[in-house]
Every structure is written in C-alpha cells, then in structure tokens.
Image: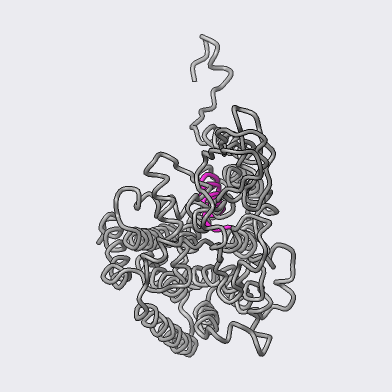
Amino acid sequence: MKSIYGRLAFIALAAILIMLPNLLWGPGDTDDLRYSVVWTAQFGKAMAAGDLYPRWLPDSFQGLGSPTFYFYPPASYWLAGGIRAIGLNIPLALTVSFTILLALSGMTMHAWLADRGTRPMIGALLYMAAPYHLIDIYVRGALAESAAFPLLPLIALGIARLPRRSGFILLCLSFAGLLITHLPMALLTGVFLILPLLLSRLRTDPRILLPAASAGALALGLAAFYLIPALTLQRHASIQWLWGPWHQPSSWSALSPDSLIYNFPAFLAIAPAAMLVASAAQPPWRLITWGTGLASVGLIPFLWDLPLLGQVQFPWRLLAIVEFAAITALMSARPRPWAARLAAILAVFAYGNWTKTTAENFSKPVDFASIARDLPDAAEYLPAGFDSTVIRKMDRMVDLRQWQALPRGNIITVERPGLVEVGHAAFPIWRVERDGVTIPSTGPILHFEARLPGIYRIARVLIWQEVAGCAISLLALILLIGLSLPFRRISHLSKFPAYSP
C-alpha cells in the first residue's frame, strides 16, 4: 500500500464496508429520511431535465410548491440529485451519496495527516468510523452535515499551507464549499476551528493574516449565489419553525437537569472520550478538542446565547470538529494509558448506543411509496402567511388537504370574471400575467382578481437576490482564477538588448 492510489482504494473499500448495511437493506428510518427522499427526488428530476440548480421544488407540500433551496444549501443534493438523475432509485442514490462522502472524508483526512507526517492511514480510518460520523449517517440521516466532514481536513490543510498561494486557494475553495454545504457547520467551523488555527499560526508567522482574510472574503463571494437569497428572503418563509424548543441550543445544555441531551447519551460519551484522547497533545489541538468538547454538550455558560451561535440549533453539531481535532491530536501524541483506557470505555458505550439505535431504525419499515406520494417538506420552508394550525407541533408535518382540490399548474383558463385561487404557493419569484400584463396577486395560496375571461399565466421571474448573488459569485470566481494563474517576475533590465542576465 505504498502507492497513493492503493491507499485511496483501501479507503474507498473501507467506506463500502462501513456502508454495507445500507447497501444491503437500504436506508433505515433515520431522522431526516423523509426530507432526503423528497429533496433528492425533485432535485434529480430537475437535473435530468436540465435545471442544475432547482431552488423551487414544485411538487412539495402536496403540489403547492416549496422554496426549499432558496434557504437550504445545495451542494449535497447536487451529488444525490445527480446520482438520481442518471437512473438510480432514490434509496440507492442516497446510500451511494453517503458512501462517496464517507470515502472522501477518509481521503481528505489522509491528505491532511500525510502533510503533517502523522500516521495518515490510521487516522483516515478512525475519522471515517468515528461515532458521530456514523450517527450522522445511520441515526440522523444527515446528508448535508455528512458532506461537511470531507471539508474540515481541507480547511485545516489550507491554513497550514498559508501564506503560500496553494494554501490560499485551498482555504478559499474548501470554506466556500462548506458555506454551500451546511451553513451552521460553516459558522461553527469559522469560530471553533479556523479562528483558533489562525491565532496559533499568527504567533509565529504574521504574514498569513492577509491571505487568510482574503480567502475568507473570496469564499463568501463564491457562495453569494446561495447566501444572498438565503439571508434576505427569510420573511417570505415560515422560518420561525426553526426555533422551537427542540431547536434551541439552551435546550441541549448538560448544565440543565431536564436537558434534551440526556435522551442521547452517546453525545455525552463522545465529547469526554475525545478530550481524553487529546489530553497529551500540544496546542492548538488539545485546546481545540477540549474547547469544542465542552461547548458541544453546553458546559460553557452563556456561549450559546451569543449572536449567531444561538442559531446553529444543536450544540452537538460541534462533535464533527471535536472528532477531527481529537484524531489529529491522537496521531501526533499518544494519551497516557489511563486516559486511553477510559476513552476506550466511553467509545464502546457510544458505539453501543449507536448500534442499538441503528438496529431500531432498520427494524422500522420505510414507506417510500407514501413519502413519494405526499412529498412532505420541512415546515420552515412553507411560504409565509399560512395559519400555524396547518402544522402539527409534535412532528412538524404540514396538512394542506383543504387546498387539495384547487387546480395546479402555471396556466389557468378563466371562464368568468372574479376571484381566482390556484393550487400554487406564493413566493416573490411568481407573477400572474395575462397577455404580458402583470395582474396583482397575493398569497399564501396564490389568488388574484380576474377582471376578464381568458388565459392567465403564472410566470417565473428573476428577483434581485438571485441576480446580485450570481453576479458577485461570478466576479469572485474570475478573481480567484486570476489569482490562481502562474505569474513570472520580469526584470526591467531585460528590456535592454545589451543586458545579459
């Protein structure tokens, strides 16, 4: 396995073995399965028809439509939807996507540890099989968050290579990728991984400050096509459903005796196990592991009350960074025997809890036909204006049967003047027209006053957020390409014929 290709093949094989239960039996009844199925189905259908970035999902919410991907990052569904578009069924497309992402996480971890010269193959395998990694796949079914795992080593590698141009480009592209993959993870990574690593490096090499800041700014520019609509259109969706008690970071603090985290004991085992593993490492990896470990279970008072951090919903998302930092630390310094033994006990508990929950998920039959029929989307992406009574609080399922009989489609034939209501959710991208003339309309179910009989059309229009976001991303891409091109310094003296270098 001296060849790098042999190592990468071995990592890919390990990913297949880890994913074998899903490959044999299909996805279990995970937390996010219904959304993954609905989004992969529609993303794949749109991509097969030539729409490579379908922000609006027309079949969601029982055919009323949903602006899901104006708010949800698209990167992981470019993968799953693309696999679906080439003909694989949805359960297999999801399983193949998780397998690819798992293999990529091992490969990028290998690259990171190889650059440090610290047992890259062992570290790559540990990273792929880390407890939270497996929980994201087999318990949560969190496709987008799983897509963040391969990017963490690349971000760290980019920072390590600063101020070289290769480090600048790698940091820029990997952080931009994280922004369009999982926004809460991007915020957590910026605060708990990028910032500590930059501060550590600035102590010895202040030259990295400018390329690091430039890489961050350019990454935001590259992701602007997604970020600008996502951040400015929230009043047009039911985003308030993202902030119920279940989604409040304060509800997950281990400092509270009735904390929700006690319902998920594996989380309480992963953080201390990682901290013990990193106990003998040098800064910054010991400090990063300990800081993120404590924060992940809510043991740092008032941290999750800070602006923006309170919007990541679940503090235990940090366990992705905890595991990355702990494995990096472990590959460079072995913990003391007592710490290793205690960490092993905690890890066995975490794996045992994961195994039990995973077995329960596989024991529940998944009604893929029902999901494909009803296409339930997430309540927070329901266009604004619907009465809250249509959303069941216990599971956030949306009941829109009262509008089931309304006509669907973007062409409406009106036979007599009057109020017309269409089975189509309202959103700023939709405009009612008749003979090229805009007809005033309102929501949340699109309706308008038809003064004349005839054919009315619901037209798709570009909004300024889409135009501005794409323009900024294009400019950022051009700038990045320009900065990536090789350049050669030419001496002014070489212009003179008599000069011989």
Taking depth in this image into account, of 501 and 200 the one nearest to the observer is 200
The x, y position of residue 146, in whole percent, is: 46, 63
From what the image shows, is residue 69 above or below residue 329?
above
The x, y position of residue 383, in whole percent, is: 62, 55
Q: Is residue 171 magenta?
A: yes
Q: Is residue 410 left or right of residue 11?
A: right
Whether residue 5 appears in this view of the structure is yes
Q: Main secondary structure of the magenta part?
A: helix
From what the image shows, is residue 203 above or below residue 395?
above
Which quadrant of the structure image shows residue 185? Answer: bottom right
From what the image shows, is residue 141 above or below residue 262?
above
The x, y position of residue 37, in whole percent, is: 42, 61
Whether residue 149 appears in this view of the structure is no
From what the image shows, is residue 447 above or below residue 304?
above
The x, y position of residue 132, in whole percent, is: 47, 74
Magenta-drawn segment: 167-183
Which quadrant of the structure image shows residue 105? Answer: bottom left
Q: Is residue 300 left or right of residue 74?
A: right
Residue found at x 35% / y 76%: 365
Taking depth in this image into account, of 475 and 167 the one nearest to the observer is 475
Q: Is residue 290 magenta?
A: no
Taking depth in this image into account, of 255 and 295 the one nearest to the observer is 255
Tell me the colour scheme of the image: one colour
Residue found at x 60% / y 31%: 434
Which quadrant of the structure image shows residue 10? Answer: bottom left
